[in-house]
Amino acid sequence: MSLPISICILAKDEDELIVECIESVSRFVREIIVLDTGSSDGTIELATRAGASVFQYEWEGDFSKARNHLISLASEPYIFMLDADERFTGGKEELENTIKELTGVGQVKIVNYISNEEQSETYVSRIFKNKQGFYYDGVIHEQLMLNGMTITPQKTRVSIKHLGYQKEIVSGKRKLERNIALLKKQLSVQPHNPYVLFQLGRTFYVQGDYTQAVTSFLEANRCIESSSEVPTYYPSLVLQLAYSLMKLKQWDQLKKLFLFGIEKYPHYTDLYFMYGVSIIESKNISEFSLIPQLFTTCLELGEADSAYYETVLGVGSFKALFNLGLFYEIIGDSAKSFAYYQESAEMGFDPAQKRIDQLQLTM
């Protein structure tokens, strides 16, 4: 028996992605709704053929308005928001248990597939009861609200595979330019909104404009420092600022940021990992001895808890092992280097196996 869930998908020109999205979940739920905002490709026909109820909506440059209209079309007791570039990776049991245990809003784990060798994890609010007054706010990177306030969500066992960060998908669309325009539009109304500034920085980073990314992140940080609350996304802001500073090779500022971040978030594995990477990248001889300590700390901490931190998979395991192998290879300790590479390779990390193959050629 299908579950009393409405899958709600907002889409435009997603003919290469929409069918797999629908098929990943269609056998488990009673209703799939696609709200199309003006596709000129085969999205509508393909979604209809895949079993979705498709509605058309005139795009107004506001994601919240579109999502709120999408909610109004849902008829089942529970709503599960999906994007066309996402795939539900679980089974009926995860969904059934989630709606049985749901008291408010359910967070699902999003696994972002950036490349074949890199994935990141985060949790996002996606499942909630219908007809309870939930609505979205914000023209872009919209947040789920109730009675004018954001909701404290509960973690679920539901997991989603997100393909939208892969280069071929990002480069094939003009989404980044559109997103920047929408974020700037929202900033014209809310110039000191740190969340919007944070999302603008992230978008500039993906676009490759690291200077503008740093500017936006620092402005978001100033807004947060002037308020009494530290938002849940603040660890991500620190990490994204670190990535941007590294791209710009601003090593002194980056070191200060890592020391601040590690003191504030001592269990955030990604900060130790990126600190170690920055020492390697900067060829900072004075801090070279810190490298094994930093990556060993990563292994001791393990993977960061993605319920609290946005994290790259492997920073607490195979990637830290690989970088320890790299360190010992650089200083000429072949035995230790080989051992760390071997352990990393056994966890399925292909670059480690390639280094082993190279080392064996020189033995």
Image (spheres, helix red, strand yellow):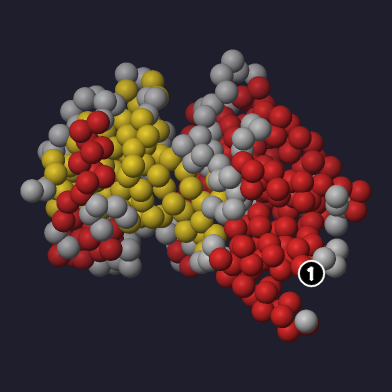
32 with respect to 207 (left or right): left
Q: Please tell me whether residue 349 is drawn above or below residue 357 in the rendered image.
A: above
Q: Going 58% across and 45% down the picture, which residue do you hit?
A: 302
The residue carrying mark 1 is 334
In the displayed structure image, the side of residue 252 where residue 180 appears, left or right = left
Whole-percent x and y of residue 183?
A: 50, 40
The furthest residue to the left? 1
Viewer-side residue, 217 vs 184: 217
Three-letter amino acid code at the position of disc 1:
Ser
356 above or below 208?
below
Name the residue located 43 percent from the left edge and 40 percent from the top edge.
123
Q: Is residue 275 visible?
A: no
Residue farthest toward the right in the current orientation of the protein: 286
Helix, strand or loop under label 1: helix
Q: Nearer the viewer, residue 165 or 140?
A: 165
Residue 213 screen position, x and y as percent: 65, 45
User: Depth check: 93 or 69 in front?
Assistant: 93
Image vertical order of residue 334 relative to residue 63, above or below: below
**Residue 145 place in picture, x, y as percent:** 35, 26
Q: Specify the quadrant of the image occupied by residue 51.
A: bottom left
Determine the residue positioned at 22% across, 60% down.
23
State whether residue 15 appears in this view.
yes
The answer to whether residue 297 is left or right of residue 94 is right
Q: Quadrant of residue 143?
A: top left
From the top left corner, tell me how far across and down residue 267 is, in percent. 62, 35
Q: Residues within 10 Å of mark 1 (few under 14, many from 20)?
A: some
How many numbered discs, if any? 1
Which quadrant is the C terminus positioned in?
A: bottom right
Q: Residue extending furthest bottom?
A: 361
Q: Residue at x 73, y 77 (%)?
A: 359
